[in-house]
Image (tube, helix red, strand yellow):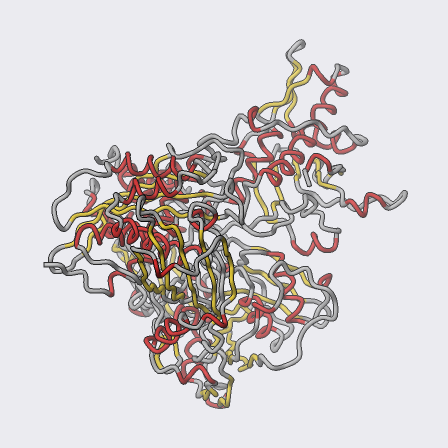
Amino acid sequence: MGLKLRINGQAHEVEADPATPLLWVLRDHLGMTGTKFGCGAAQCGACTVHVDGVATRSCLLPAQAVQGMEITTIEGLSPDGRHPLQTAWVELNVPQCGYCQAGMIMAAAALLKAKPKPTDADISAGVDNLCRCGTYPRIRAAIHRAAGQAKPA
Amino acid sequence: MSADRRQFLIGAVATAAGGMALGFLPESAAAADGAAPELTPWLIIEPDDTVILRLPAPEFGNGAMTQQAAAIVEELACDWSKVRPEFASATRDYTAFSVYSVVPQAAAFFGGRSTFLMRVMGLQKVGATARQRLVTAAAAEWGVPVVEVTAANSVLTHAPSGRTLRYGEVAAKAAALGPVAVPAIKPPSAWTQLGKTAPGKLNNPQIVDGSLTYGMDVRVPGMVYAALLQSPVHGGRLKRYDAAKVKAMPGVLAVVTVDPDEARGVAMMSNAPYGYALTAPRAAVAVIAEHFWQAKTAMEALPVEWEDGHGARWASTQQLYDAAVAALDHDQDARVERAAGDVADIHKAAKVVEQTYLTPWCDQAPLEPLNGTALVTADKVEVWHPAQNSQQAFWVASDESGMPPERVVFHQTYVGGAFGRRLESDDVRMVVAIAKRFPGRPVHVIWTREEMMRQGKYRPMVAAKLTAALDEKTGLPSAVVARQAARGHYPRFADTAYFMGPIPNVRVDARELANVHVTPGPYRGPGYNSYGFIQETFIDECAHAAGADPLDYRLRLLATWPNAGWAKALKEAATQAGWGKKLPKGVGQGLAICGWGLNGTAKAGTCVAVVATVEVTPKGALTVRQLDAAFDCGRVMNHDAVANLMEGGLIFGLNMALNEEMTVKDGRMVEGNFDTYPVLRMAQAPKINVHFGGLSGADRYAEMGEPPVAPVGPAVGNAIFRATGKRLRRTPFLKQDLSWA
């Protein structure tokens, strides 16, 4: 019962129970550990990936449901780790422990595709992942920077 | 003991790749007559100029790794972009005579703190000695005096002849030199990098591309996964389970148990920094499978019965709160923590303020769930773990496996948040306890969020009753009695400015709630985070009773406090926030100041003053509009890192005050995930202004991770009082009725 998945532009065939959440297929079966396990209840967003370009929490999402769809993980966001969001994150020294940040960046990347010049309200609505270290002010600033916007008043 | 009085012996060897490795020689080994001491490298310079630094303090979000590297680079004068940090091995520290912990009380700490001056000086010596070797080797190569060679940005320069060499080009020759004199290190006044804004975190690039290896990301050949279920009532025991029901499920390899009552341990003196008493295992059953999802699925299908134990008699949280408050009226069991002057006549004063406060159990909830990987074989145990203190984890792994420490191979990973939960290493014990029942294969044990949250080690529930007699002329407290009750007491109440002189007559005592079963643990600012709320709310009540302005009242109370940073921070926060401006009903500003790390003396630690600006609608909807914070930690080692920790610490403290409460039903912890234990999200994070104008410049670089956490709650609570007239004497605020119309 091989699962056929398309991840970061590559086809994968995985021997796993089709009900296995995409998160665990990525992490355990494919060794792609950039997508994180945080809550297992689609609450925290550490497991955020793109499914056909839409930010999606993968920890409750059965892998069989996304067969044939284009999945992008943090490993595939940019070829060299220099997506404008990744660059802005480093420039503004956003992370503390860093565990939530890949999910944050994936959520922010989907937001910027939909709204290239987001307002503060757009960011609050579009990036509602959890950061226990409390880096929200810097995440907000880094999204604005990646969007080419000066720090809003 | 000053670091300068200690003789550092620093040696070097060539690496296989043609570079130089450098490290402190262990004192005991160096003293061995004639024997060539083993060299454990702190620092390696490769031919391509890469600088590998082996650093003892783990990195769990506070920037300790980067700050340790910055201290070395301050002297090494290498290109920052060539620095590659690694974790020093706790195993090697043990087998090589404390080679990474040779600086007393400083580098010895395999925990997170990185800015204590003694530790910084030890790290500077590593860098300075490496630089001196490189300079000496280059001078020999060119046949010029050593003093004519300069080092900067990974390049050695002989200015008179214009010649240059890269560090990597002379590293092997530098390693082959005999002993070089350890040069004097720069005093703080001569620092060129430390004390400035930069650098950002060294591991940022790996965080943002997802490649950083946290404990959860460890992959070892042959690894299997375990899901665990522990007694739902803390302190309970496993009665029975039926492994046959799940043995045939996909991927399932074994069902194993953890028995708290079995004999364990190694017959030798331990150097575990926090001992073993706090690391007690819990009764548990675990399913081991090829993949985690299989293990979790089978775990949920496994029939299990528990012997709940005495904790099950607590039907509700309220019963526990009532018991804690009732205990406050029994002084015979109390332990006096601080006593000064005379408080016998406190109730005879003309004006007395007396109130009872309570803070609930709170879960640290780091975003990376507890987990760890262990491989137990006949002659060793190998552990890959996200520890908050790798030395503690190393020793606990020894104790649980029964292996003497030289047979424990410990690998520190990056850590997805800790906040005290990963400090005591009970998690390592559970991992090894499970792995030793499945020897020969590495077992990666993962707690689900629910399992972690319900089987926590919480910030203790604290009840307190405070009584003050107010001076008839000044309105300031002339006497205070502070009574506390908790199980798992992390004393900070006595360690606060008000009780250390400014209030002349003081009695602070504490009662241990022995029959409470809920397991206590550290948290971000253990003890401090509860007592800060209690005492700063109480002082605000005293100010109100005296008809005084809360800022002016605190400044007058602190007038005799020898640490001027407190008043400076208060004034800075108040000025920046526009304290005293007229605000409409329903909007209010509140103030609080708390100090962490005084340890019984005035001129120590870090104080943080916060002004909160809040709005409460008549129906009771609360918005925290803005937090203005000022602080005094003496001096700052890394401006931007401090700002980041302040911002995060304020949000952490705000969440604690607004949302956090672990409750109990029939002895079981109720909340299990972020739906019932909410954590602030972007939309709820207020505007935060961190002000540096409170810094006193005093000669210390005190901690910044914990200090911001405590003052936020009382500042917000005091602001709610000024906006609505409602006084909040317990947290969390959002579970209380704030309506005022």
Q: Residue at x 50, y 79 (%)?
A: B235
Quarter location, residue B77: top right
- Closest to the observer, B190 or B22: B190
How many marks are shown on the rendered structure? 0
Say if residue A63 shows up in the picture: no
Rendering coords of residue B204 (x, y %)? 45, 43
Residue A90 visible at all: yes
Quadrant of the snapshot with the C terminus of chain B:
bottom left
Of residues B610 and B188, which is closer to you in this image?
A: B610
Residue B740 placement, left or right of B683: left
On the image, the x and y values in percent for residue B633 come to 46, 39
**Residue B732, quarter of picture:** bottom left
Residue B85 image-quadrant placement: top right
Image x and y of residue B1, in percent: 69, 41
B211 on left or right of A153: right
Determine the residue located farthest toward the left in the rendered image: B741
Q: Residue at x 66, y 9 (%)?
A: B160
Give the residue at the far right of this rendering. B34
x then y, percent, for residue A33: 45, 58
Foreground of the two, B32 or B704? B704
Q: Name the side, left or right, on which B122 lies relative to B664.
A: right
